[in-house]
């Protein structure tokens, strides 16, 4: 469990760096530092949630990792999307994809 949690958090932090660049290129870096930090932090929280959800069985098939990652990515990404008044919708879609990636990496390497 500790290994999965660490892998989830680290993967989320790593993918969050890509979010900073993507969002920064779309909306600008100057004046948006707090928003960019919140996007990165959201990915770290996503890694935490997915890391803790290792025993959660969403569907009874080999696709559980993908469905669980998609659902948790959707829920966690929705938090920042709603609170930012839908300021950057592409980052919402990226968050859903990152949820799948984080869950796959955490499951594969833990």
Image (cartoon, rainbow, N blue to C red):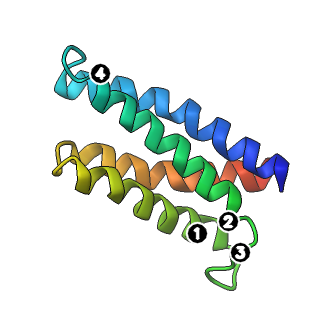
Pair 4/1: label in front: 4
In the image, which disc is placed on residue 33?
4
Mark 2 neighbour class, 10 Å CA radius: few under 14, some 14 to 19, many 20 or more:
some
Q: Residue at x 46, y 37 (%)?
A: 41
**What residue would you read off at disc 3?**
62
**What residue would you read off at disc 2?**
53
Residue 110 visible within the image: no
Query: What's the distance in space between the residues labelled 2 and 1, CA to CA?
Result: 8 Å
| Label 4 vs 1, first from the N-terminus | 4
> Residues at badges 4 and 2 in contact (C-beta under 8 Å)?
no
Badge 2 element: loop
Q: Is residue 49 above or below residue 13?
A: below
**What residue would you read off at disc 1?**
68
> Residues at badges 2 and 1 in contact (C-beta under 8 Å)?
yes
Q: Which residue is more in the foreground, 89 or 53?
A: 53
Query: Where in the figure is residue 55, as x and y percent of width and height?
Result: 76, 72
Q: Is residue 39 left or right of residue 48?
A: left
Query: Where in the figure is residue 101, as x and y percent of width and height?
Result: 58, 49
Query: Where in the figure is residue 3, as x and y percent of width and height?
Result: 83, 47
Q: Is residue 62 above or below residue 9?
A: below
Q: Looking at this rendering, what residue extends furthest in the top direction?
A: 30
Pair 3/4: label in front: 4
Query: Where in the figure is residue 82, as x and y percent of width and height?
Result: 24, 57
Mark 3 neighbour class, 10 Å CA radius: few under 14, some 14 to 19, many 20 or more:
few
| Label 3 vs 2, first from the N-terminus | 2
Q: Which residue is more in the foreground, 86 or 96?
A: 86
């Amino acid at each position: 469990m500790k290994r999965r949690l660490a892998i989830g958090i680290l993967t989320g932090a790593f993918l969050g760096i890509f979010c900073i660049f993507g969002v920064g290129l779309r909306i600008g870096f100057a004046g948006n530092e707090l928003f960019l930090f919140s996007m990165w932090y959201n990915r770290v929280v996503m890694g935490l949630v997915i890391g803790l959800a290792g025993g959660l069985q969403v569907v009874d098939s080999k696709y559980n990792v993908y469905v669980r990652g998609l659902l948790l990515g959707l829920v966690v990404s929705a938090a920042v999307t709603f609170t930012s008044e839908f300021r950057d919708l592409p980052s919402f879609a990226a968050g859903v994809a990152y949820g799948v990636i984080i869950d796959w990496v955490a499951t594969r390497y833990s």
